[in-house]
Structure formats: C-alpha cells, structure tokens
Amino acid sequence: MIGLIVSIFIAIFSGVIWLGVKGGTGVDRYFYSAVLTWLKYSDENARLAALAAAKVASPNAQEDYKGKLIVISTYLRTAEEANSEQIKNAELLFNLYREISSKNWTVEDAKEERKKLFGAEPEYAQALNKFDPSVFAKRYSNNNLSLGKKEKVHVQLLKSLAGEDKMV
C-alpha cells in the first residue's frame, strides 16, 4: 500500500513539474531532484540543497517553484483519499514554499545558503555549483533496486521528463 501511495505521489509530482523540468535549466533539474530526494528518502540535506538551489535561481524560476509546490501541496491535502503520508508530504512542501516565499533573496543570501549546504553536505554543494542533479541518483542508486514495478515506471518517467539518464 505504501509503495502505491509513493508511486501516485511521484506520478503527481512529475506531472505537475513537467514544464519546469522538461525545458528547465540545470538549476531547475537540480531543485526538483533535490525535492524528490528529500521527500522519498527523508534526506534533510536534500531539502537544504533544494532551498539553496531556489535561492540561486532567478526570480522567475523561484515563482515557478513556488507555484508548483503550492499546487502539489494543495492537491495532496485535498485528495479524496488523502492519508497521513500524503498530508505529511503536503505540509513539508508547503513549508518549503513558505521558506522560498519568505523574502526576495539576494546574492549574499544565496552565498550563505551554499555555505550552509557545504557544511552539511559538501557533495550536494559541489553538485549545486555545477547544477548537476545526478548527485542525488548516485547517492541513492541502490535504493532504486527495491522499487516496485509501478514505482520504477514513475521513476523512468521522471528521468525522461528531466532529460537525465539518472535521477531519483
């Protein structure tokens, strides 16, 4: 049952971020990969990576991220058969939305967030400097082997949407 819920969530998330990732920049792919990694593996450093990527991104990209986060969060909260996992993920996404929305980020803010990320997870910080989302797939590549058939299909969909050979 949990596997099915995760599959549905990943499918919803991948559908909503279609435009952001398909034609997106390197920072877009990094941001969405970090968010997916954070939610799927409860990796708090991936949340820091997503926040750092949002602060580095252009104001237009930040607006796009916020829009997608709020849409997904609202959907998960109001889904007819929302369960505790979906509600938890909705709250996490909404909190990330609020963090990104809390102010107009400056270059200095972005530098500070990168330093914070480097202190917590140097590998993610180095990948952010290159806008390389593959760092998340490399970190959790063995976990993909335990996914069910439906989850593998959704992971493959996410890979194709992002234009990446390897993604979470």
Image: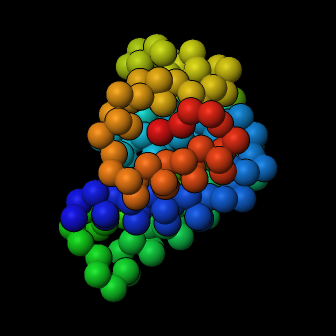
The image position of residue 125, as x and y in percent, is: 53, 20
Is the residue 4 above or below the residue 147 in the image?
below
Residue 162, by quadrant, is top right
Residue 99 visible in the current orientation:
no
The image position of residue 164, as x and y in percent, is: 65, 36
Residue at image x 47%, y 39%? 168
The image position of residue 75, as x and y in percent, is: 45, 75
Q: Is residue 48 left or right of residue 58?
A: left
Q: Is residue 114 left or right of residue 9?
A: right
Residue at image x 21%, y 64%? 1
Question: Residue extending furthest front?
Answer: 149
Residue at image x 42%, y 40%? 37
Residue at image x 70%, y 41%? 163
The number of discs equals 0
Q: Nearer the viewer, residue 31 or 164?
A: 164
Q: Is residue 91 left or right of residue 56?
A: left
Is the residue 44 above or below the residue 150 in the image?
above
The image position of residue 3, as x and y in percent, is: 28, 57
Q: Is residue 121 left or right of residue 58?
A: left
Q: Nearer the viewer, residue 146 or 53?
A: 146
Q: Nearer the viewer, residue 53 or 26?
A: 26
